Amino acid sequence: MSRIISGVLLLFLFNAVALSAEEVIQLDSLDIQEYKGRSGIWTTIESQAKLNYYLKKFYITAGDVQEINGTVKYRTGKYFFIPYSEKYLLEIESQGIKRDTITSRKNDFIWPLSEVIRISSAFGQRGSRFHTGADMPATRGTPIIAVMDGRVLLTGFDRGNGWNVILEHRDSFYTRYAHCYKIFIKPGDYVKKGQVIALVGSTGHSTGNHLHFEIRYNDIPLNPLDFLPAKENIVRPHSMRNWK
Ligand SMILES: [Zn+2]
């Protein structure tokens, strides 16, 4: 009996140590991105000539592109993930192009945009409505990254959120990324913390390019700023503004 209890205790301690250990997270950038465990870049392919250009530039085959995207059917505005070969990766690394890294514990969220200097609308009561996330202004096309490892639960469009993504994480945590300009990932995809999933836009009910970011526990929206790593000098809206 006591052996079982000490076994359970050991397992618990092991998990606690594993979850609190810091790990190095690679952050996707405009130059190097990740999808399904491969490095490459999300881009449009409008023609055979454009595809041929990428095949030559990245030292890959049409089969590599087909394999990771399922299909290669050109359509204006449709994004494909073009994987880099090892040779091309080494080539750009020698030019000093590489991903930024940060350290984060397994169980911790990271920021969904690499540079956030201002929260334009905070979580909480906003006039007569409750604002269920935090708004982060950014220029159109800024990469939005997954804040924690997870699985894509939903991608879609609705009038309020515009193009939006919901990721499912461990322990019944969910994150939503709304008003996207473009969404790359598909429902069922597994995503890694730091991986680009979409681009900032202003779709749906939005007055300018920004990311509306939510963290939910089951279906309960929580204040994202209580969970994201502390940032110095971030400008938040004054709470008095919400007084009526
Ligand atoms: Zn919002």
Image (tube, helix red, strand yellow):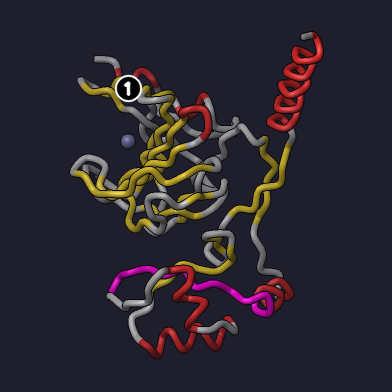
The residue located at (20%, 20%) in the rendering is: 128
- 81 drawn magenta: yes
| Residue 62 placement (x, y as % from top left) | 48, 83
Task: Tell me which corner region of the image, top left, top right, bottom left or bottom right, holds residue 39.
Answer: bottom right
- 103 drawn magenta: no
Question: Which residue is outermost to the top?
Answer: 2
| Residue 78 placement (x, y as % from top left) | 32, 69
Q: Which residue is more in the foreground, 76 or 29?
A: 76
Q: Which residue is more in the foreground, 75 or 7?
A: 7
Question: Which residue is outermost to the front?
Answer: 1
Image quadrant of ligand 1 equals top left
Q: Which residue is more in the foreground, 52 or 119?
A: 52
In screen coordinates, is 173 left or right of 107?
A: left
Q: Amino acid at mark 1?
A: Arg
The residue located at (54%, 32%) in the rendering is: 228
In screen coordinates, is 133 left or right of 88?
A: left
Q: What range is drawn magenta here? A: 76-88
Task: Tell me which corner region of the image, top left, top right, bottom left or bottom right, holds residue 38.
Answer: bottom right
In the image, the residue with mark 1 has its CB under 8 Å from the nearest atom of ligand 1? no
Q: Which residue is mark 1?
A: 241
Crowding at label 1, few (<14), some or many (≥20) Cα neighbours within 10 Å?
few
- The quadrant of the rendering that contains the N terminus is top right
